[in-house]
Image (cartoon, rainbow, N blue to C red):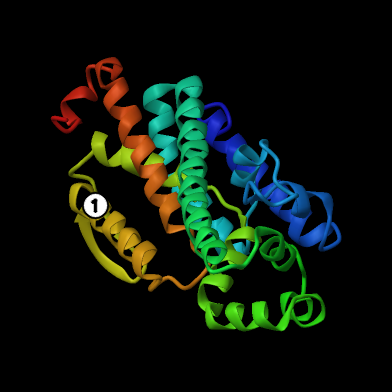
Amino acid sequence: MWKQLPATVSVIGLNVLIFLLAAQILPPENVLVTTLPLYFPKNDNFGIWQFVTHMFMHGSTTHLFMNMFGLFSFGSILERIWGVKRFLIFYFVAGIGAAILYTLIHYVEFQSTSSMFERNGIPASTLNQILQAENPEGVMMQSIPVETIQLLKENIAPLRKLYNIFNLRMVGASGAIYGVLTAFGLLFPNAKLSLIFLPVPIAAKFFIPALLLLDFFSGITGFSIFGGGIAHFAHLGGALIGFLLMVLWRKDVKPEVQPLLYDL
């Protein structure tokens, strides 16, 4: 398998190794946990390298298994078609692009919400003091004027939103996996796919768009059948980057695979 799928096997192996080191072997707040996830750009822990390294961090065994299962199932096919170099370029461009789009969406949300607070007379310095605190309620009670505290309490929902964005740590290869899944769907639209809770096989040309619409709905509403803490817009970003790469590369697809492409 190593000789046939060196890229897929290597990426999976590196993900498993880092997960074991970060979650099972090293102390809870080790250097991997504190420097590899993707932080919000205004957070002091943010580093540009995190647009890549977050793809090798996972929050749980289930998270790791699902992503690596998807990578092996669909990535192995793409690697056989494209070869190692093109597959790795696709994988990392989709993952990095997904993270950038996800960060941009959060940045716009953050700027819009923080501007609302400033228009209501709450200075940026006060907001930063709260956002950087491990115990924001304690900071509010100790060093912020009573009038400002009242304004903050009246806008507690957007304040929590700001706090969550500022302190968010994004991990996982899901953006890249969604790019891979999108590429697979464009190459093999009639391939039958199914989920564990949906055992009836559905053609990729219907399955993948439905999955993306579900992610879009969950991203907009905050309601998710898969539980909380999922970066839905990163999924959509990975799918978008994957689609754009497939459009860019469609003339380079091998002749035996080209008839399977959608007429984009």
Residue sticking out furthest to the right? 27
Residue 72 visible, this orientation:
no
Q: Is residue 127 above or below residue 172?
A: below
**Residue 205 locus on image (x, y percent):** 19, 47
**Residue 136 locus on image (x, y percent):** 73, 74
Which of the two residues, 80 or 1, is positioned nearer the viewer here? 80
**Residue 72 locus on image (x, y percent):** 47, 44
Residue 30 visible, this orientation:
yes
Residue sticking out furthest to the left? 263
On the rendered structure, is 124 left or right of 174? right
Q: Quadrant of residue 14?
A: top right
Q: Is mark 1 on a helix, strand or loop?
A: helix
Residue at 69% x, 52% y: name it: 43
Residue at 45% x, 50% y: name it: 105
On the rendered structure, is 108 left or right of 258? right
Which of the two residues, 83 or 153, is positioned nearer the viewer here? 153
Q: Which quadrant is home to the N terminus?
A: top right
At label 1, counting other C-alpha atoms closer than 10 Å, the crowd grade (few under 14, some 14-19, many 20 or more) is some
User: Mark 1 highlights which residue?
Assistant: 209
In this figure, what is the number of numbered marks? 1
On the rendered structure, is 26 left or right of 110? right
Q: Is residue 77 above or below residue 198?
A: above
On the rendered structure, is 202 left or right of 239? left
**Residue 150 locus on image (x, y percent):** 62, 84
Q: Which quadrant is home to the C terminus?
A: top left
Residue at 47% x, 37% y: name it: 97
Looking at the picture, which amino acid does disc 1 mark?
Pro
Q: Quadrant of residue 194?
A: bottom left
Q: In this view, does 203 lie above or below 53?
A: below
